[in-house]
Image: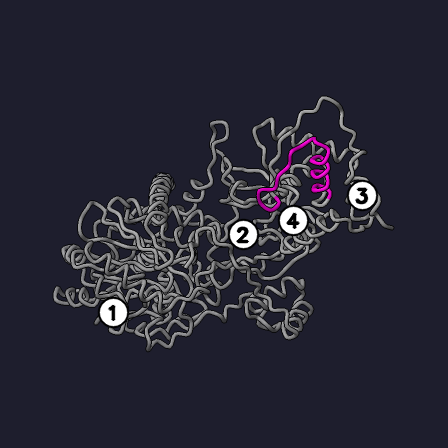
């Protein structure tokens, strides 16, 4: 196995271009009135006829499933109703991530609206760890709690549920994590992943399961129609459901897409004080000392990359209760104060993440055996438990390999781990295979957590890599990026950028469209944001469009002005000073495949002409005075700056920047003529890389006397 850190990605096109697909695109475009590009995007997402394509765009409410189809949901409703009627103390027990926090808030607010006696409990990530614990049950018992309802957790709490029963506490479990063979012996276990659960849509977030639970409660207790109940509850809680669903990276299709779409519109209306305060705090900028608020477009991306990390930061570096209290805030003053605290916590999290990430990368380079192990397993004593999951994501993204980071924070013998995987290796199944080395484990196919004793780490590392060797192929480990289809620059315009919004909200299984464009020229390459990002212009000879490549510096791209590239990109609308323009966001780029072949043929052509082959005038081989001057001055300037070696790519790029498109063959002829006439000493230590020295001459050299130049002039044909 080769080292993956700088591996070239494989590009895949989703659009297959078959006759069936072309006919589907044509029918959808004509019958529902969208552009052929939009029709291609719909076909790529599985909507191959006009009716299903139109339903996807319009998001008919019939996509919402019947909540009463969830196994045990009526048992759960009956136990909750009994607790409300009796005035029992109810505890909503959640997880400390965004999905858990929003699920806690949704159920807490709903039960409060019924007049229930309710409190919430979220374990501390550092002190207690993930899931239900006997310690937490004891605390809730001391508060007089007789019913615990879990949200986004609890599906593995077999022993804890039995312990609670001994204390006279009932459990209702609502969760969405994968089930084990045995379910907890709770009053009700509501989880669409139960093998015996007929609910048709399995990809609800934890907060989505809670939403369906309260929909069932409303329908069974009010006598109102399902449509009335859903409309009322969407208006009350869809913003929370949307945030949790996006943050937990759930597929945005079917009812997830519908609820998220409605939830984003609620967030945009700023009706929840805590969310409004967090949006303001997240986008606030200092402008000459005075605070200025810009109004961001509320999209799934904005939630995923701006709001969710700040809500998550509470549970990672402080207490998840901060995020809950923010979302439950009833006064602007309290909401503003908590929002500011969450933003500070997020900065703290970012600093800690950067520190751990650099340490992790250094350990990988020094210790990991890429030839043997497909899974990166790292451990340390100084890593913050709340951040290792994020760093694991960065490691997997960089190396294209599954990774698990374990921390023994505080120097104890019990460690907490967090892992991320790649397609081809189900992390939950891999951890089950290694369960004899673990104390606790659980999660999803691509993200999971674990507890482990220090002395078991070597055995765990060995065993999970044995499992990976049986289940992962070399093909699985090649990083891939996908594009929906290839566009020409002529197809990229404001109408298309606006039409793409019909597909929103974007997310898993409904990704933001990515396009490919081939053989465009790179211009105006510049670093922005302190050099962390790259801004460039791409052009096809007639048109040009601005593009941004985030989190990649110009130096890291190995790209020169004037070179032709293939790019993968999304299309955005950039607003600046009231003007709207199309902007590309680059996902990946590479030297144009057409350019690789062209450069190969140009080198061969240079050698042919050097040996005396005829050529046509349009090949532009013969240099003129200005060409000689531009190349010579460039060489002299480079030598003066201490740079006595340049590649052909750098030569051509710098000449292009000076407005001289010399071309490879002509450049090689100029260098050969300079060497022949004693102006330069030129060597080629490796292919298309030239080292040179300027030779000082006492008298002026007449380049017209060059034998090679005369040969070129005599070999030109019409």
In the rendered image, which residue does mark 2 sit on? 587
In the rendered image, which residue does mark 4 sit on? 564
Q: Position of residue 449 (x, y in %)?
A: 29, 58
In the rendered image, which residue does mark 1 sit on? 79
The alpha-carbon separation of the residues under discs 2 and 3 comes to 47 Å
Mark 1 / mark 4, whichever is N-terminal:
1
Instruction: Answer left or right for 133 relative to 266.
Output: left
Determine the secondary structure under disc 2. Answer: strand
* Closer to viewer: mark 1 or mark 3: 3
Would residue 459 be visible to someone looking at this image?
A: yes
Pointer 1 local density, CA inside 10 Å: few below 14, some 14–19, many at least 20? some
Disc sitting over residue 676 in the figure: none
Q: Which residues are magenta?
A: 666-688
Q: Are marks 3 and 4 in contact (CB under 8 Å)?
A: no
Q: Give the quarter of the figure containing the N terminus.
A: bottom left
Which residue: 64% across, 28% down?
Answer: 637
The alpha-carbon separation of the residues under discs 2 and 4 comes to 17 Å
Pointer 3 local density, CA inside 10 Å: few below 14, some 14–19, many at least 20? some
Mark 1 / mark 3, whichever is N-terminal:
1
Q: Position of residue 149 (x, y in %)?
A: 26, 63
Query: Which residue is nearer to you in this view: 232 or 511?
Result: 511
Instruction: Answer left or right for 444 relative to 587.
Output: left
Determine the secondary structure under disc 1. Answer: helix
Mark 2 / mark 1, whichever is N-terminal:
1
In the rendered image, which residue does mark 3 sit on? 711
Q: Are marks 2 and 1 in contact (CB under 8 Å)?
A: no
Would residue 333 be visible to someone looking at this image?
A: no
* Closer to viewer: mark 2 or mark 3: 3
Mark 2 / mark 4, whichever is N-terminal:
4
């Amino acid at each position: 196995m080769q080292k993956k850190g700088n591996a070239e990605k494989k590009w895949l096109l989703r659009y297959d271009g078959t006759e069936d697909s072309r006919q589907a695109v044509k029918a959808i475009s004509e019958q529902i009135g969208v552009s052929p590009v939009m029709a291609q995007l719909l076909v790529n997402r599985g909507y191959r006829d006009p009716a299903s394509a139109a339903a996807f765009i319009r998001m008919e409410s019939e996509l919402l499933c019947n909540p009463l189809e969830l196994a045990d949901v009526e048992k759960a409703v009956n136990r909750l109703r009994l607790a409300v009627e009796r005035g029992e103390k109810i505890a909503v027990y959640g997880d400390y991530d965004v999905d858990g926090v929003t699920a806690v808030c949704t159920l807490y607010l709903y039960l409060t609206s019924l007049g229930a006696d309710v409190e919430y409990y979220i374990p501390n990530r550092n002190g207690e760890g993930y899931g239900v614990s006997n310690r937490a049950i004891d605390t809730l018992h001391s508060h007089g709690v007789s019913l615990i309802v879990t949200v986004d957790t609890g599906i593995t709490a077999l022993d804890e549920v039995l312990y609670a029963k001994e204390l006279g506490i009932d459990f209702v479990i609502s969760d969405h994590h994968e089930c084990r063979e045995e379910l907890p012996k709770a009053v009700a276990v509501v989880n669409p992943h139960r093998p015996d659960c007929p609910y048709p849509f399995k990809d609800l977030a934890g907060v989505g399961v809670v939403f369906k639970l309260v929909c069932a409660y409303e329908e069974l207790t009010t006598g109102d129609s399902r449509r009335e109940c859903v409309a009322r509850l969407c208006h009350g809680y869809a913003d929370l459901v949307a945030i949790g669903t996006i943050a937990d990276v759930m597929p945005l299709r079917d009812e997830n897409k519908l609820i998220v779409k409605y939830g984003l519109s609620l967030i945009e209306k700023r009706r929840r004080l805590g969310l409004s305060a967090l949006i303001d705090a997240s986008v606030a900028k200092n402008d000459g000392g005075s605070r200025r608020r810009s109004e961001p477009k509320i999209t799934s991306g904005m939630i995923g990359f701006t709001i969710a990390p700040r809500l998550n930061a509470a549970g990672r570096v402080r207490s998840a209760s901060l995020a809950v209290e923010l979302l439950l805030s009833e006064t602007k003053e309290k909401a503003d104060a908590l929002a500011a605290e969450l933003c500070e916590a997020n900065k703290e999290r970012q600093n800690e993440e950067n520190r751990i990430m650099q340490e992790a990368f250094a350990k990988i380079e020094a210790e990991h055996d890429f030839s043997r192990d497909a899974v990166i397993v790292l451990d340390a004593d100084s890593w913050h438990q709340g951040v290792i999951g994020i760093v694991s994501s960065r490691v997997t993204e960089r190396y294209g390999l599954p990774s698990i980071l374990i921390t023994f924070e505080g120097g104890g013998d019990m460690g907490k781990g967090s892992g991320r995987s790649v397609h081809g290796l189900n992390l939950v199944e891999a951890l089950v295979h290694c369960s004899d080395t673990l104390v606790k484990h659980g999660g999803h196919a691509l993200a999971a957590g674990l507890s482990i004793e220090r002395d078991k780490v070597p055995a765990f590392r060995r065993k999970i890599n044995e499992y990976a060797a049986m289940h992962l192929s070399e093909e699985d480990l090649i990083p891939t990026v996908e594009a929906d289809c290839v566009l020409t620059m002529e197809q990229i315009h404001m109408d298309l950028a606006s039409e793409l919004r019909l597909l929103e909200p974007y997310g898993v299984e409904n990704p933001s469209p990515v396009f490919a464009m081939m053989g465009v020229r790179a211009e105006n390459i510049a670093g922005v944001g302190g050099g962390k990002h790259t801004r460039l212009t791409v052009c096809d000879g007639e048109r040009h469009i601005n593009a941004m490549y985030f989190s990649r510096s110009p130096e890291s791209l190995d790209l020169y002005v004037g070179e032709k590239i293939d790019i993968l990109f999304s299309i955005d609308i950039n607003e600046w000073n009231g003007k709207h323009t199309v902007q590309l966001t680059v996902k990946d780029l590479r030297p144009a495949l057409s350019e690789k072949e062209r450069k190969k043929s140009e080198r061969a052509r240079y050698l042919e002409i050097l040996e005396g082959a005829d050529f046509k005038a349009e090949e532009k081989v013969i240099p003129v005075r200005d060409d000689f001057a531009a190349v010579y001055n460039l060489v002299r300037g480079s030598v003066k700056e201490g740079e006595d070696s340049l590649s052909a790519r750098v030569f051509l790029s710098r000449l292009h920047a000076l407005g001289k498109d010399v071309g490879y063959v002509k450049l090689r002829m100029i260098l050969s003529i300079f060497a022949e006439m004693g102006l330069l000493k030129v060597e080629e230590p490796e292919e298309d890389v030239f080292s040179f020295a300027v030779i000082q001459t006492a008298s002026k050299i007449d380049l017209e006397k060059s034998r090679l130049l005369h040969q070129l002039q005599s070999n030109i044909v019409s």
